[in-house]
Image (spheres, coloured by chain):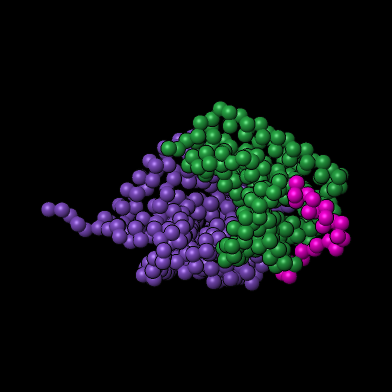
Chain colours: A green, B purple
Amino acid sequence: MRVYLTAARLSLRRYLTYRSSAAAGVVTNTIFGCIRAYVLVALWKERPEIAGWDLSDAVTYAFVTQGLISPMGIFLSNTELGPRIRSGDVAVDLYRPVDFQAWWLSLDVGRAIGNGILRSAPPVLFGLVFFPVRLPAEPVRWLEFAACCVIGYAISFALRYTASLVAFWTMDERGIATIISTAGMFCSGMLLPLTIMPGALGTVVQHTPWAAVLQMPINVLLGTQSGGFGYALAFGSLWALLLLGFGRLLTSSARRKVVVQGG
Amino acid sequence: MVDERPLFGPRAYLLLVRMWSRSASQYRVSLAFTGFAQMLVASFDLISIAVIYTHVQTLAGFTFAETLYLYGTTRLAFAASDLVASGIESVADSIRLGTFDLVLIRPVSTLAQVLADQFTPKRFGKLIPAVVTLVWALTELPLHWTPAKVAVAVVTVLTGFVLYCSLWVLSGCISFIAVDAREVANTFTYGSEYATEYPLTIFGRPLGLALTFVLPVAFVTWQPSLYVLGHADPFGLPGFLRFASPVIAALLAGLAALAWRGSVRRYRSTGS
């Protein structure tokens, strides 16, 4: 266990080093948050309530999702494993006397925490000052939100890890990884809240694993999750276990069957 | 006798583009997938706009067909500029690593080299949904076409292309001043594209005017499109601005060229 904690800590330290790049990222995420908020404001001006959300809920959604982009790795199609499989460096990783999946999880957890510390709060604070962002005062809500975020993160990691493993078979995982992350961007609610999508589209997107990455944590934070915290917890945990399990299966078959490239 | 004149910029650019395309097509499956992903991105954007209009008849005073037209012209101009100029994104890395030195010692235009850098045919994937959207918008719109409107519509896409290319070059210049600012540079390119996909009225008057006169993205599609769509300017700006886009595009392109020269002169390589 200690080795994983050390790996996570060192990875965290590495990500905390790039402060000026984090500052640039914060500016970007905040500006994009504003544009997204303006689109939602224009929509909610025409209809004061959509799917149980008022204007405040909608702009809160816009800025909290911007804050979660980096730790959740929404724009990452991959983990750092992908390029290492492509170059053949993964041979070194396979020698390590550790569990392969847990090792990469530790490194990515360090990344997520580092990015969370440096990049999550500023867009939300900006929204609080310049937009009608409304955050709950009850500590219980925040604990439930945090739990949902951890589960959402696990799903995000499981998907990116599996996408990286594809490189063992196809030599270049970037194509398939980009398709998965593009679908994920839409299905996680990065473009529009999933709750306002109509009919069958709405039903489908609210049941993909990505629904637990951004939409459900924020639903829980705003107190509008249908079925409440319990449902979000059960839904997310189920997907997380399934996807992490699938990643393990794929890992062991890659270890047994695949030849590493590189000289 | 050996001809030692440097290659003509555009010709060098095309040669480099061909070289990078051949390199990218070594990974054929991956290329097909990433091209498809690019199409997917644009399609999801389009679905989002359609979802918005399932809830309302007009958004900030504009109908679905009108927003489609704004979105289509923006996307087409941006996708074309992305195809041609987004190679400049990697200039930040070559400055950080000091490999920009290599760009300087080759007898080829520096701009041609960085614009063509890592060109990949996957970017054609973005053009397809843009064209489809624009055609869709044109069939949905109840417009009386006049020769003047057709001309303005065509010029909209062309000047939009020039404006975005200038923004790509300017965003590359930012990397010379602050290497870590790559993500900020993104707001100029991707951000201004995102902002012009929707009617400018959603930003309200002060920000709408800033996007007209400070960062002139309103001239990409908004101003000329008001003329084509026969819409009065919600901000009440004078009518001649509808036709000012080519002038603004020329000015911004000139500014970008100057900024690029200044940036290359300022480059001092890395210490290591």
Examine the rendering and report whether any part of residue A220 can be seen. Answer: yes
Q: Say which residue appears at 68% left-offset and 61% top-offset.
A: A117
Residue sitting at 49 percent across and 40 percent down? Answer: A88
Residue B68 or residue A59, whichever sits in front = A59
Q: Position of residue B28 (x, y in %)?
A: 45, 35
In the image, taking residue B190 as reference, residue A105 lies left or right, namely right
Q: Magenta residues: mostly which secondary structure?
A: helix
Q: Position of residue A239 (x, y in %)?
A: 74, 38
| Towards the viewer: B23 or B187 | B23
Residue B33 or residue A257, whichever sits in front: A257
Q: Residue at x 83, y 55 (%)?
A: A143
Instruction: Say whether residue A40 is visible.
Output: no
Residue at figure coordinates x 75%, y 46% from the top left: A151
Please tell me whether residue A148 belongs to the stretch shown in magenta.
yes
Write the start and end of the magenta stretch as one range.
A129-151
For this view, does B181 lie left or right of residue B267?
Answer: right
